[in-house]
Amino acid sequence: MSDIYAYISLFFSSLLASTILPFGSEAVFGVMIHKGFNAGLCLLAATLGNTLGGVTSYALGYLGKWEWLEKYFGIKKEKVAAQKKYADKYGGILAFLTWLPIIGDPLAVALGFFKVPFISVIIWMTLGKFLRYLIVYLLLIEIF
């Protein structure tokens, strides 16, 4: 029964890592792989948690308003509108990059703000986050 708590912990650490909190879920993932936990369940828990965290960032952006950007962040509408051309051109494919450090979370917020279709975002976001953990796993099994 204690194994289930480990997978739940990995899920939540991955969720937190995909928010603005400075937390690295790869360490928890790596320790669990090293300790012999089921790799498939670790990949599933980490991917789902990290994707859900990205979806929360997307949702925050979706709820955002132009007026808030100017009032609270001093960002002019023209500057944001210039960035919208990328969201219009590439759409949900950009969500594949939300696993990246530093730019991933703001990218998820921007995709929500620009109302990029959710289905496309969730598919590409999940794929990108899964591949990141898969690569970490493959590197770890080479090390261990």
Image: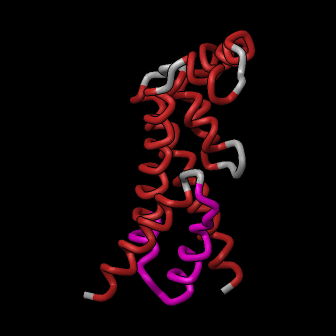
- Nearest the viewer among 40 and 107 is 107
- Nearest the viewer among 61 and 5 is 61
> Can you give x and y, in whole percent of width and height, for residue 34 in the image?
56, 86
Residue at 61% over, 49% down: 99
Tell whether 38 sits left or right of 21.
Answer: left
Tell whether 122 sits left or right of 87.
Answer: left
User: Please, is residue 66 above or below residue 57 in the view?
Assistant: above
Q: Quadrant of the C terminus?
A: bottom right
> Can you give x and y, in whole percent of width and height, for residue 122 in the image?
44, 37
Quarter of the image where one finds residue 21: bottom right
User: Please, is residue 27 above or below residue 84 in the view?
Assistant: below
- Nearest the viewer among 77 and 52 is 77
Residue at 54% over, 20% down: 114
Quarter of the image where one finds residue 142: bottom right
Way the structure is coloured: secondary structure
User: Please, is residue 49 above or below residue 60 in the view?
Assistant: below
| 39 drawn magenta | yes
Q: Quadrant of the N terminus?
A: bottom left
Residue at 59% over, 70% down: 137
> Can you give x and y, in whole percent of width and height, for residue 86 in the image?
68, 19
Outermost residue to the left = 1
Q: Magenta segment, which residues? A: 21-43
Residue at 46% over, 74% down: 39
Circle count: 0
Magenta stretch: helix, strand or loop mostly:
helix
| 123 drawn magenta | no
Tell whether 39 sits left or right of 96.
Answer: left
> Can you give x and y, in whole percent of width and height, for residue 5 in the image?
33, 80
- Nearest the viewer among 138 and 15 is 15
